[in-house]
Structures are given as C-alpha cells and as structure tokens.
Image: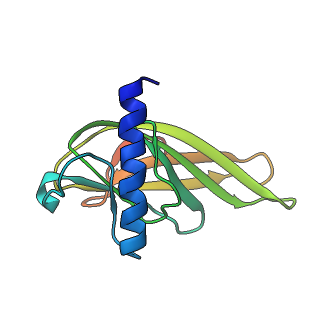
Amino acid sequence: MSERRVSVCRGMAIVIFVALAMAGCGTARMYDGPERAPSEVAVIRPKSILYGVKIVTVDECETGMLDRGVEVLPGKHVVHAEASAAGAIGGTDMWLAYLTFEALAGHHYSVAAARTGAINYVGWLWIEDDADGSLVTGNRPD
C-alpha cells in the first residue's frame, strides 16, 4: 500500500472514530473533506436479517466496528464484506467477498448475505440497490 493510501486510511480512521463517538446511529464518512449533502454521496449499509453482515473495508480502508454503514463519494469502490451464522454442528460459519461496484450519488445500497445447504453450505454475499432491490454486484441464490 502506498504512503498516500496509508495516510488517507489513517485520516479516515480518525474521522470514523470521531463519528462513532459523536453519534450512535447514522453513517460514517469514508472520504476526505467536508461533509457532503445526501444527494452527493452514496450510502452502503450491512443488511442483517438472519446473518451477521459486516463491512470490513471500503477501498482498502478499515471501517472499524461499524455495523451501521458508510458514506462514499460516487464512483468505483471495492467493499470487503463478511457474513457469519451459527454452524450446523456448533461453532460459527463465516464467509467473505470482495465486491466491486459503481456507486451512484444519492443511492442507498445494502450488503446482504444468505447461506444455502446444511452441513456443506454455500455462503453468498452481494450488494443490492435499496430503491428497487436490484442486484448491483456479487451473487445471490436463485
């Protein structure tokens, strides 16, 4: 990782920490500069119904302990997401994916997960547009 990328990630980590300290809900900014209007950013949130979904990084920058979501500027982004669920024979099953997509200004997206099968399961992760539920990237079971 370049020195510039490390510097930007450190700066974002500080912004995220301050945002977490100041607000118990909402989103954290994953971009430099002043806060932008909702119509100028995209929001990515984990969608947890049956599975624990976590956004680990966005564009190689750690999100910390966020279970609520992040704001990004429009453009291409890579989201490292993980999901977990209780295992069939005890323990916890986990799966991950690196999901690349083009975020549009003013849009809200969800990182969702599913698992098919019992013991030899297949884990699925994808990003969908909240406006209509359409698949943006990744794979989801039929």
Q: Nearer the viewer, residue 30 or 5?
A: 5
Residue lying at the far bottom of the rendered structure: 24
Q: Nearer the viewer, residue 130 or 142?
A: 130
Residue 124 x/y as whole percent: 56, 46
What residue appears at the point 58 percent right and 49 percent down from the top-left corner?
82
Left or right: 32 as drawn, with respect to 1: left
Residue lying at the far top of the rendered structure: 2
Q: How many marks?
A: 0
Residue lying at the far right of the rendered structure: 89
Q: Nearer the viewer, residue 122 or 83?
A: 83
Task: Identify the image's colour scheme: rainbow, by chain, secondary structure or one colour.
Answer: rainbow
Left or right: 37 as drawn, with respect to 24: left
Q: Identify whether 134 is placed above or below 85.
A: above
Residue 44 x/y as whole percent: 35, 55
| Residue 107 falls in image quadrant | bottom left
| Residue 131 falls in image quadrant | bottom left
Residue 117 x/y as whole percent: 71, 51
What residue appears at the point 42 percent right and 67 percent down from the top-left corner?
20
- In this view of the protein, can residue 98 be seen by the observer? yes
- In this view of the protein, can residue 78 be seen by the observer? no
| Residue 5 falls in image quadrant | top left
What residue appears at the point 36 percent right and 46 percent down from the top-left corner?
11
What residue appears at the point 16 percent right and 56 percent down from the top-left corner?
106
Q: Nearer the viewer, residue 3 or 42?
A: 3
Residue 116 x/y as whole percent: 65, 52
